[in-house]
Amino acid sequence: MVRHITGEVSAVPSTWLETIGVEVERRNITAGLNYYVPASPYHRLGMHVGPPVNASCRCDDKHHWRVQAHGDIDIVPAGLDGNWQDDADCTILRLWVSPALVRQAALDLDLDPDRIIVEPQFQRRDPRIEHIVWALASELSPEMPSDRLYGESLARALAVRLVHGAAIRSLPSGQMLSSGQKRRLQEFIEANLDQELSLDDLAEVAAISVSHLKVLFRRSFGLPAHQYVIQRRVERARLLLGESKLPLSQIALEAGFAHQSHMARSMKRVLGVTPAALARLQR
């Protein structure tokens, strides 16, 4: 449905995201307030509605100053956060778009979805997207009954426009994870070392495909994801050996290893010593 909101919130509606892959809300923005919008697993579109305003935007480590006019569209890919500020009260129509919907649109166009890179765009003028946004806002309004099939067709049409406006390329040789993606991955891994971690989990945190994660993780951290996780588990085990009196079997589980022997093999490979020898050295 379309929500009418004043001010900034971090919650993301889910009803239509789950069913058609798109969600819309009308958001009233207060003049002068610096709104932080956290990174999302969804692509976000914001279309300015009404009189022009002087706007400031920081996103993807770039700062943009511009006059935001009616119909101007900002596109923020999944995984990027940012700050927005306007010098007058204004209204935007904000959309969340599921990356899965964009991937399916790429497949329908006989394109490799892993080569479709939705990049940040600001003040994009696209009459077709503008028409689709207004149609979605009307179709998903709680004031009128919704036609599921029509809503799905609008969502697919929007995804196709995003694909047409996206970069189609392989990963450049020097491309790395952004500082935000790298920070979120580090925090997620540290918080979940004692859990099973998969490439799918990490790709979702970074809001990129698994194939891109494999390449960019190695470039950004200097080693593959599974080796990085092993090193962090070894480091946690080393700290626990020095700070606690837990048995080795319990330390292994606390650090995320399947069992004590797994920890011993990994520690020997990374540090060159066994847990028992390290425990003796740290006493």
Image (cartoon, rainbow, N blue to C red):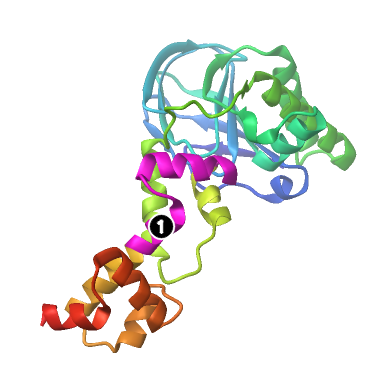
Seen from the viewer's position, the closer of residues 60 and 152 is 60
Residue 165 appears at what percent x and percent y?
65, 19
Residue 241 inside the magenta-drawn segment = no
Compared with 240, 271 (above or below) is above
Q: Which residue is mark 1?
A: 227
Seen from the viewer's position, the closer of residues 6 and 47 is 47
Q: Residue at x 72, y 42 (%)?
A: 21
Q: Residue at x 36, y 87 (%)?
A: 249
What is the magenta range?
Answer: 208-231
Say whether residue 220 is left or right of residue 164: left
Compared with 57, 68 (above or below) is above
Quadrant of the drawing holding the C terminus: bottom left
Seen from the viewer's position, the closer of residues 59 and 267 is 267
Residue 251 appears at what percent x and percent y?
32, 81
Question: SS of the residue at dot 1?
Answer: helix
Q: Quadrant of residue 265?
A: bottom left
Q: Amino acid at mark 1?
A: Gln
